[in-house]
Image (spheres, helix red, strand yellow):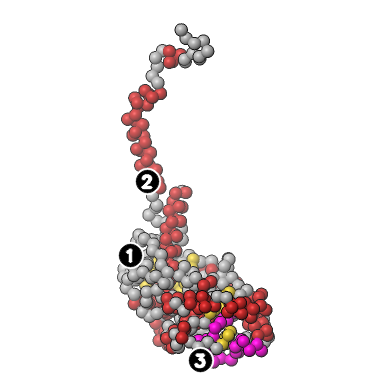
Amino acid sequence: MRDPKLPKPPPAARRGAPTLAEKLRRHSPWLLLLWFVLSVYLFLSAAPPAASPLRLTFLPKPRALSATTASKPTTRPPVGIYVYDLPSRFNRDWAAADPRCARHLFAAEVALHEALLSYSPARADRPEDADLFFVPVYVSCNFSTPNGFPSLSHARGLLADAVDLVRRDMPYWNRSAGADHVFVASHDFGACFHPMEDVAIQDGIPEFLKRSILLQTFGVHGPHVCQEAEHVVIPPHVPPEVALELPEPEKAHRDIFAFFRGKMEVHPKNISGHFYGKKVRTELLRRYGHNSKFYLKRKRYNDYRSEMARSIFCLCPLGWAPWSPRLVESVLLGCVPVIIADNIRLPFPSALRWPDISLQVAEKDIASLETVLDHVVATNLTVIQKNLWDPMKRKALVFNRPLEEGDATWQVLRELEVLLDQSERMSYVGSLRR
């Protein structure tokens, strides 16, 4: 007899209708087919597109990204670059006209070109096999100014002519609008092509370069008009033999506490109305010019590197731009760089741990500089020097010709590989969102 407290079964159950499990078993072949079709659809829709809509749109060769550091280089070529063979008026004629073209602080444009030509594992002989395209234009070799410094007045026109030539005669620029093309802009404010920051900001980067990749010495943390293109921060050029001219850093006799030789204006506001180096150098001279621990000199001296090699600390204050070749020279000569340039971005941070081999002092803290240096001497100077004197650290900042594993050109190739890998991942994510 039925328990009166239990609910009555539904009518369908009383009539003997099939249960849910029986219905699923009856239609299982169709459900399996539907599941298979849906899986294929989802797999195909998630695949990355053949061409990316983002910055680096032409990535023909699949690569496995390989990380490296200055102390552990790898023998595998990092990225394939096709080097355009431009008419000599864009490069070789400038180098032949003046030997300074290949040796001065902006000469990375020459060194990188020659290193890439000499290093066959990184160079793509056929453009169809390339990851990137290098456009070799020497815009820093016009030494026509009265003071002998390179003139940049022709830079935009020369580069525009080169881009017009590449765009007209080769198909690779047009398919990506230049996004996979690489240029060197080793000047004060990169591709803004002017030594005065306010003018550089007003002029900006030429429109035809804004989608390309720039190798530039200028870099700061935060937004700046002169780094509004994809870029890699590179070191200023210092001739590689500098590291070989003097005793090895660990064997040098260092009898100078803190060294600086260079432009230090007593009245920093020059004829153009600009304050040179934000008055930092003037403040250094005012506060420490008569301090026997500080070796500060305003006059030029051709053998100034021998003075750096005798120094414990080498001051690297900003000039017109945040960077200077003193940074590289200090590392090569084993003198601890003291960087006084707010917000500066330093080259190759993945290969060089700058906090381990240098000091950074804020521009506003010039008054406490001696105290800071004394504290370092009393605490961790030997640790910093040990890190700094690692030969691979020096090598990472030098543009050798031909390229050597672990040197500055090698580090540039690694940074470019990282950019390509990031672009590929962003492109894949973008394809999923469409």
Which is nearer the N-term, disc 2 or disc 3? Answer: 2
Q: Residue at the location (54% across, 78% down)?
A: 381
- Of circles 2 and 1, the one toward us is 2
Which contiguous range is marked in magenta? 289-317
Left or right? Give the position of 117 relative to 145.
left
Please rate how many residues cluster around mark 2, counting C-alpha atoms within 10 Å: few if below 14, some from 14 to 19, many from 20: few
Residue 128 badge: 1
Q: Is residue 170 visible?
A: no
Looking at the picture, which amino acid does disc 3 mark?
A: Asp
Query: Percent position (x, y) of residue 263?
Result: 60, 86
Q: Which of 235 and 145 is in front in this view?
A: 235
Q: Can residue 299 be seen in this view?
A: yes
Query: Percent position (x, y) of residue 49?
Result: 39, 52
Alpha-carbon span between mark 2 and mark 1: 27 Å
Residue assigned mark 2 = 44
**Residue, far front:** 378
Q: Residue at the location (64% across, 83% down)?
A: 284
Query: Percent position (x, y) of residue 403?
Result: 37, 77
* Secondary structure of residue under mark 2: helix
Residue assigned mark 3 = 303
Magenta stretch: includes residue 298? yes
Q: Is residue 40 above or below residue 288?
A: above
Left or right? Give the position of 410 relative to 228.
left
Q: Residue at the location (59% across, 91% down)?
A: 299
Please rate how many residues cluster around mark 1, counting C-alpha atoms within 10 Å: few if below 14, some from 14 to 19, many from 20: few
